[in-house]
Amino acid sequence: MSAKKITDEEVVSVGKKRKIWPLLLGTLVFALAIVGTVSIVNTVRAKIVEYREQSEDTSAYARYLTWVVGVDPDPFTDITKANYDSLLNIAACSLLSDEVKTGQYQATEDGLVVPQGDVESKFIEMFGTEVPILHKTVVGYGYEFTYSAQTKTYTVPLTGVVPPFVPRIESVSHTGGLVVLRVGYVSTSNVEVSPEGELEATQPDKYMDITLKQTENGFNLVSIVTLTMGEYQ
């Protein structure tokens, strides 16, 4: 039977991928679902289907990477050299996708009003304190979170947002207290599901090595490095 394109409310399971010994390979299971009756952003809920060559659970990495991959910032080897607008974008989208009860924010005809303190806390949680925080309007793929210096708030439109990519963790390695994740960027526009709910074959558009540092509250992003075709084949 012919495949159909997924909608932003359909649940998608990314198919199995061969193991590469001795690294853990998994497949990201994600859903693009509108949050609440007044939707803010499409939530990408991450879960790893593991082939247990190792006992490590990579689902926490996948959750963290949801909007890191979704925003798709330019590569960098030092977080202080990263594009600041992209980091702020990641923090704002992650906050709004992170099991937040949207009812806690005031809703106006322009959208939900989010205090800058909440965005700031998420920014520090994800990236640490090495990058100074500068509040400003967030502009992403088809959305804009307007910042008001007067009210110290962000106004988030009541519309859904579908990220251009979702993460698929290919392998995990540990070095010097850091974790290096080889991540496939799977385009949401290319994912197809058959009428029976089976995933049609798809491959990531590109691959990145993403380095994270463990913290008390989760992870901090350290670097994102582009891989050439010869490095990941």
Image (cartoon, rainbow, N blue to C red):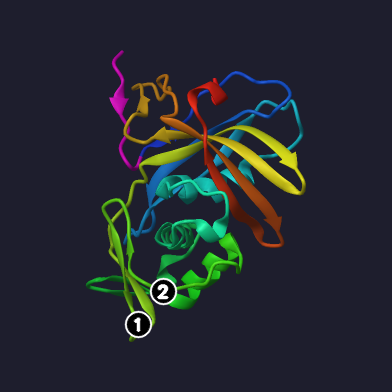
Q: Quadrant of the C terminus?
A: top right
Amino acid type shown at disc 1: Ala
Residue lying furthest bottom in this view?
150
Q: In which quadrant of the rendered view does residue 221 lie?
A: bottom right
Residue lying furthest top in this view?
1
Please provide the residue range marked out in magenta. 1-9
Q: Is residue 180 left or right of residue 15?
A: right
Q: Is residue 233 left or right of residue 161?
A: right
Front one among 165 and 5: 165
Residue in the picture at 33% in, 69% down:
137
Q: Is residue 210 left or right of residue 162?
A: right
Amino acid type shown at disc 2: His
Task: Give the residue pinned by disc 1.
Answer: 149
Query: x, y (%) of residue 181?
Result: 62, 39
Instruction: Using the image, tell me which numbered label, if any, was put on residue 135.
Output: 2
Q: In which quadrant of the rendered view does residue 25 lie?
A: top right
Of the two numbered discs 1 and 2 on the same chain, state the one appearing first in sequence: 2
Q: Quadrant of the N terminus?
A: top left
Query: x, y (%) of residue 135?
Result: 41, 74
Q: Report helix, strand or loop for mark 1.
A: loop
Neighbour tally class for label 2: few under 14, some 14-19, many 20 plus, Cα within 10 Å: some
